[in-house]
Amino acid sequence: MATFTATTPLFEVMRDPAGHEILAHHVPELAANPLLHTLYHYQLGLILGTEESLRNDPAKKAEILAKIEALQPSPAPDRSDRDNEPSAGYESESVERGSAQADFAAKGRKWKRHEITLQGPSHGNPFTEVTLTADFTSEGETLTVPGFYDGDGTYRVRLLVPAEGEWSFITRSNAKSLDAITGSFTAAAASPDARGVVRVADTFHFAYDDGTPYLPIGTTSYVWTHQGDALEEQTLQSLKNGPFNKMRMCVFPKSYLFNENEPGIYPYEGTLEDGFDYTRPNPAYYHHLEKRISQLEQLGIEADLILFHAYDRWGFSTMNAAADDLYVKYVTARLASHRNIWWSLANEFDLMFEKTIEDWERFAAIVQENDPNKHLLSIHNCRQMYDHSRPWVTHASIQRLDIYKTAEMTTQWRQEWQKPVVIDECAYEGNIDQGWGNITGEEMTRRFWEGAIRGGYVGHGETYVHPDDILWWAKGGKLHGTSPDRIGFLRRILEESPAGHLEPLPGHWDAPSAGIKDQYELIYFGFNQPTYRRFVMPPGIRFEIDVIDTWKMTVKTLPGTFEGRFRIDLPGRQYVAVRLRAVA
């Protein structure tokens, strides 16, 4: 019995190494098509039958199909290659231990980066041949922090200082000149506006290190940092004027619908024509990325950084295991000192057919080992949900699986994983031909409210057709949709809640509600349109009531107070919420 047939979905063939090789060899224009991922759910025979290069060549189509039908299941790919091992004798015995020039400030500050800069050797390939860490110690606590090579003989070790006080450090390296360098600095108290790293709080929510609640109001612009200064600065201005405090974004460039332009700079040494050296990261690439991440921090925006994705024509998604590990270690060492980093191992991990669950688990371990500040860490799905019960997963980062049910699933996912639920991709407001990118502003706003009332967090994206293919979801620029202002209105409502976040409440069969029982309740009617509502509340508690039009962004406080059994009039429109506030 054949493993594959003409009715097999294309993605099943492409995830098989031998099937992928056959298609890439015989129909290279299909394998390299930037629209490839939009074709995955179609049957193999249909795709081959409609491929331009095969339309007038039925014999070749039949030959390709026969080769694929004859395949036996491929064994799991060998991901054990570890050829990037550091050299024990990188520097000669004549080099004096600890002789490298070291620069660092004598004073630091809690929740700010403290950097040691070292001028060391540059022969060979320092990215792979040199190991460097530093042990930072204060009041008996020691943090081991990885260093990294920044090109031109420069090495850096960066610590996001977790506490005030006296700190000392000692470096460790296989390069003698970088080894056993010592120093100390004094970390002052955090600045008044500093709040620290975002952590999980109260099981399902988030807060900064100082305890201030953090409500992720996120958006997506995958490759906004690859678009040139003019468009990137426009994106930052849009963010400055918008409601969002989290940005999903990729490290690597992207090849996909509306993403066919080349980036101005590449993450590795090499060229598009000659290929890239995956053992030599390009420091200039990361200088630019860090600049943009720092600018997001200045705007109060968390950088939800996606390490891997499948939308690739440069080979970054299909590197061997050694290159993958080197990359994860390098990125973590460079960027973990940014306060506003969240780690996302992948966008749509299940479309990266070459990688296994064991790979993702290994990458998670590498991030944890090399991030002394333990930033949030998750992974994102397409068709197949990752096991978010894994202990390293701090929060569920979700793309909806059902076409229609999105935020409504928050209740189930909270119960299943007992972790914060962040629906980073609920579909996008826009008007492209793809179902994931053409919901209305009203529906985007409804999904935000539905998720919030159910105790989760929904993310935004925007995909309006643009003459120059500048769609916010990919490239940033300007926001054109109607939902961002309404999402900002929701953010203000959430920030007014007494607990700093919403916890679901039972009691209404037809409308979700959240808040604090008998003290504060927010009820959302969504696409329903009641003209009145009856309530039964405990006697002895008086409530003030607000009628909130989530689309018109108005709050109308009803006259008087209400107690026990009562009825209120409502406007008979969709997207209305009611807020009850107990009167002291």
Image (spheres, rainbow, N blue to C red):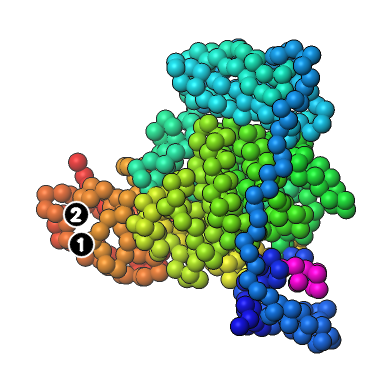
Q: Nearer the viewer, residue 480 or 424?
A: 424
- Region of the chain picked out in magenta, as a range: 20-28
Residue at 29% across, 68% down: 510
**Type of the residue with mark 2:** Phe
What label does residue 535 carry, if any? 1
Q: Quadrant of residue 287?
A: top right
Q: Position of residue 37 (x, y in %)?
A: 67, 67
Depth-wise, is mark 1 or mark 2 nearer the camera?
1
Is mark 1 in CB contact (under 8 Å) with mark 2?
yes
> Which labelled disc corresponds to residue 562?
2
Q: Residues within 10 Å of mark 2 (few under 14, many from 20)?
A: many
Name the spot of residue 373 as percent of width and height, x first: 51, 32
Say which of 377 and 193 sits in front.
377
Secondary element at tag 2: loop
Q: CA distance from mark 1 to mark 2?
A: 10 Å
Crowdedness of circle 1 by 10 Å Cα count: few (<14), some, many (20+)?
few
